[in-house]
Amino acid sequence: MSPYLSTLAQATLPELDALRQYRDALISGRAFADWQSLWASFTGFLHDLWTSGAVSDWRQGWMLVFSDRFLVVYFAPLLLLLLLLPQRHLRSGIIVTGLLFMTYVFGAMYPLIWLAQCVIFYKLSEQFSIEVKRKDVLRWAPPTAAIACVGGWYIVSMMLTRIHFSGPTNAWMSENLTFLYPLGARVYPWESLWAWEPGKQPMQLFHALFFLPQVNGIVIFTIRMMSYFSEIKRDTIPPTQRSLTKFLAFSTFAPTMIAGPIERYREFNHEIDHCHANRNWREMTYGLFRIALGLGKHLFNIVVFAPLVYGWVLNSGYYSHPENIRSYWALLISIQLQVFCLYLNFSGYSDVAIGMGRVMGYRVIENFDRYWLSCSLTEAWRRWHISFSFILRDYFFIPLVRRGWNVVLALMITFAVCGLMHNLAPSFVLWGLVMGGMVAINQRWSRWMRTLDRQPHRALSAVRRHWMRLQPLPRLCAWFLTMNCLCGSALVIMNDGGGIQGWRVIWEIVRRPTAALLNLFGVEWQGIP
């Protein structure tokens, strides 16, 4: 669940009261009597949101909408400055505007931390380029050291949230050193609080800076370093292409800094070198369209879709008492709708980031490609978070297989890393192991089907040919199974916002058809604890 949707699920802040009222209207069925009542409920929600004190002025409404990944919209004014720069100063402009963006959004201390990590990792990478070519050291030592440095910083950044100041010190810092705090955790006349409620203890500084690594850029920086060190080991980035300025521009490009799409070093610098030549009115118009599309997805999600979906999930006891949900289809579809909420949020952000790049003439890699059309898990991971999926494939899965690792084990390790990049929690590792196992089964099945196609004389081959003649039924069955496996796996990591995990839902999804099958054979079993 994304940070925004997790907040929506818990919904304790006064800014969300009107949103919850609107959600309750949707869930109760009053909003679905007809289109007029739906429109009346929606306009009433907007009116209440503005006048009831939940959002008393434009500042609270703005910050309610443009939080989480959509903090990227605050880069828009700085994007205009980049358009004015000549090619020779573009990288310097990217660095300066990126640091300015971080200063406003994450506080004045964060760009200093970011600069320090970039300089340190650049120096480490240059030393790594020397060590990896030495013949007098163990072959595995430099890569192991690189993994320890990259992974160690990721873990340390998570642990920085534990740095606490005393209550009076933290309150004094919040009042007198406001500029150190990120957006939403500080009090400026033109801003509104959302990270903590007035009258309570202010959020601790380091907790405010690092408690969402998926938003502050640490996760994306870590993944980029995986790619960068791997390319240096492969000797695909010559020393003439490595400089501190290029590295800083690569790490500090604000539109993709928060949550991607995740560029690779060579592709990024190639695009920056040619973005002035690629810039034209057609590209800029398309870029503005993608920005508008992303914002439209986000607004639809937070105003209509997410309140409806998560409102039903909470009110129905989907996580706490799934056995009380009468419809089996509701159990299956609800998790898919929750994943679609995440898709609207994430792909909407990616659209904005890609659009900002296209306005500059920089063609950012696409990150999503209609995942809901996938008919296999392998295909789904070529459509979901594409830039990250390909990095995992190229720098984890393929190298492990080439070294003789078992394919199933390589897949499980690859997806376990994927889970850890989302959160350092056992449930995310377990999700990775489950997803890796399912993808392995999918690949084995595909290979078996190809073998049957090459051996038409076998009886099973004849069965397969007859089955495939029933199109589109076979494709619909493959699609149905893929969507339920892809989205259903999210139950391993998702919860109701209050700590109740999705294991009860998984059990209920398995229990009902199992009980029905056993009852057909005269075995009475309900399986309800």
Image: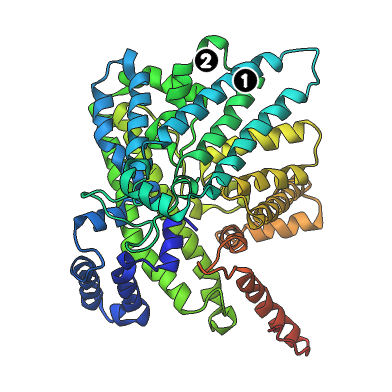
Q: Residue at x 71, y 57 (%)?
A: 464
| Quarter where residue 201 is shown | bottom left
Amino acid on which the number 1 mark rests in the picture? Ile
Q: Is residue 141 above or below residue 428?
A: above
Residue found at x 37% / y 39%: 353
Kind of residue at badge 2: Arg
**Outermost residue to the front:** 168
SS class of the residue under badge 2?
loop
Q: Residue reaching furthest top?
A: 240
Seen at 23% across and 28% down, the residue is 281
Displayed quadrant of residue 24: bottom left
Mark 2 is surrounded, within 10 Å at the Cα level, by few (under 14), some (14 to 19) or many (20 or more) other residues, namely: some
In the image shown, does 321 or 405 lie closer to the viewer? 321
Cα–Cα gap, marks 1 and 2? 10 Å
Q: Quadrant of the C terminus?
A: bottom right
Residue annotated with mark 1: 232
| Residue 314 image offset from top left, x and y in percent | 46, 74
Question: Do tag 1 and tag 2 residues touch (Cβ < 8 Å)?
Answer: yes
